[in-house]
């Protein structure tokens, strides 16, 4: 095995290349959408400087490497995986003008025909993306789009979600613990989790059949992953049936009333002493340098429930369902909040 300095340099070089590659695609998309950017209303807060942005990225990667050194997960240097994802470059660049055109004509309801039978809030093109979340084409584009949006930092932010899960699994006495991924999408996080801990039983829950189909392909080498097409606010799972649950960038796409229902469902399916890890956009005041981004983001993309989310009192939301916050971690533009379900029954 290479020495630690060599491994650290390899990691740093890989992340620098990743940021350069996806950052270039972000800039290309921004050039295509330059007319939209030019019409943004002046934000209430200052936009972040390049220096503060790069400093926050640096801090993200420094902590990521510390987690590797602590043995929480292997060094994320997988050339084959990175190459497969990079192959989406052409699809991304071809699709970007379609997204911009949809934004210009405010076409956020093109998926109604594809979304029959699904909740009304889901029947729209979030981010003005092609086919919303409701086609295989969208599923093939999604992971690249997310990495480009975050200039190559998305995977590092998601890896931070594993930290509280790993510590919980190491401390629990449960036999065959189950991890539930709510809004599992194309299965990226569960694929990472299973690569770190192959014996972990997992449930991938998502409303999108095409995204779940892609998740099944991503996780096809594991036979202990269950796939469920269902909403977070009505999960077809037994009470107290999972040890840990996560949700990554889902709650800001739920209407306020549905968030309340989803929080209740999470508390219902968690076993006493279980944890829920919420990975979401930072909220106002979490990373003050980035408050200006929170001002402008909803006007750049179709995110009808984003503004209400970034002002939501998360402690109150989940406390009402019986979950108590026990930890918070800011990972660049992501806030990771850990909630615990009490081992004692709630008073009636």
Image (spheres, rainbow, N blue to C red):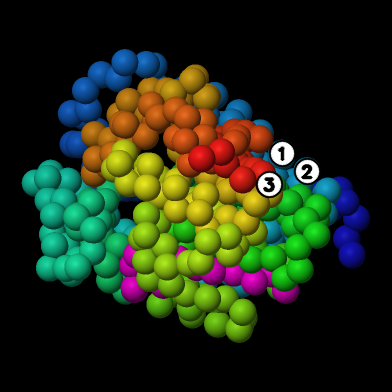
Looking at the picture, does residue 212 appear above or below residue 347?
Answer: below
Task: Specify whether residue 202 is painted magenta.
Answer: yes
Q: Earlier in the sequence, mark 2 or mark 3?
A: 2
On screen, 333 above or below 109? Answer: above
Mark 3 secondary-structure assignment: loop
Whether residue 94 is visible to the viewer of this picture, yes or no, is no
Q: Are marks 1 and 2 in contact (CB under 8 Å)?
A: yes
Q: Earlier in the sequence, mark 3 or mark 1?
A: 1
Q: Is residue 52 left or right of residue 144?
A: right
Up/down of 6 relative to 213, above or below: above
Q: Nearer the viewer, mark 3 or mark 1?
A: 3
Alpha carbon separation for disc pair 1 and 2: 6 Å
List x then y, in percent, for residue 96.
Answer: 27, 55
Quadrant in the rendering for residue 46: top left
| Residue at the outermost front position | 348
Q: Which residue is mark 3?
A: 343
Would residue 20 be found to the left or right of residue 312 on screen? right
> Disc number at residue 97?
none
Q: Is residue 2 magenta?
A: no
> Label 2 to label 3, Cα distance in Å?
32 Å
Instruction: Give the camera-side residue of 248 and 38.
Output: 248
Q: Which residue is mark 1?
A: 62
Mark 2 = which residue? Answer: 66
Magenta part of the protein: which range?
199-212
């Amino acid at each position: 095995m290479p020495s630690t300095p060599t491994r650290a340099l390899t990691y740093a070089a890989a992340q620098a290349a990743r940021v350069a590659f996806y950052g270039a695609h972000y800039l290309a998309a921004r050039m295509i959408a330059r007319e939209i950017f030019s019409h943004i209303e002046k934000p209430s807060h200052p936009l972040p400087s390049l220096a503060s942005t790069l400093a926050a990225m640096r801090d993200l990667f420094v902590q990521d490497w510390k987690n590797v050194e602590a043995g929480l997960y292997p060094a994320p240097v997988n050339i084959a995986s990175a190459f497969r994802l990079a192959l989406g470059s052409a699809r991304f660049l071809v699709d970007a003008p379609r997204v911009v055109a949809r934004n210009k004509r405010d076409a956020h309801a093109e998926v109604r025909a594809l979304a029959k039978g699904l909740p009304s809030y889901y029947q729209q093109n979030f981010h003005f993306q092609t086919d919303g979340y409701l086609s295989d084409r969208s599923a093939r584009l999604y992971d690249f789009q997310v990495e480009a949006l975050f200039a190559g930092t998305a995977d590092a932010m998601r890896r931070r979600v594993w930290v509280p899960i790993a510590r919980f699994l190491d401390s629990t006495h449960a036999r065959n613990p189950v991890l539930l991924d709510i809004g599992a999408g194309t299965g990226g996080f569960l694929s990472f989790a299973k690569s770190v801990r192959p014996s972990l039983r997992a449930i991938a829950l998502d409303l999108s059949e095409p995204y779940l189909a892609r998740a099944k392909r991503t996780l096809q080498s594991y036979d202990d992953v269950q796939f469920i097409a269902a909403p977070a606010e009505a999960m077809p799972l037994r009470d107290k049936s999972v040890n840990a649950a996560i949700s990554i960038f889902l709650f800001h796409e739920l209407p306020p009333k549905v968030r309340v229902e989803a929080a209740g469902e999470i508390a219902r399916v968690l076993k006493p002493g279980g944890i829920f890890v919420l990975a979401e956009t930072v909220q106002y005041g979490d990373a003050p340098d980035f408050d200006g981004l929170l001002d402008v983001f909803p006007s750049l993309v179709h995110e009808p429930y984003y503004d209400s989310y970034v002002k939501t009192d998360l402690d109150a939301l989940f406390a009402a369902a019986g979950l108590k916050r026990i930890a918070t971690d800011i990972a660049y533009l992501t806030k990771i909040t850990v909630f615990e379900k009490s081992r004692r029954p709630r008073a009636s």
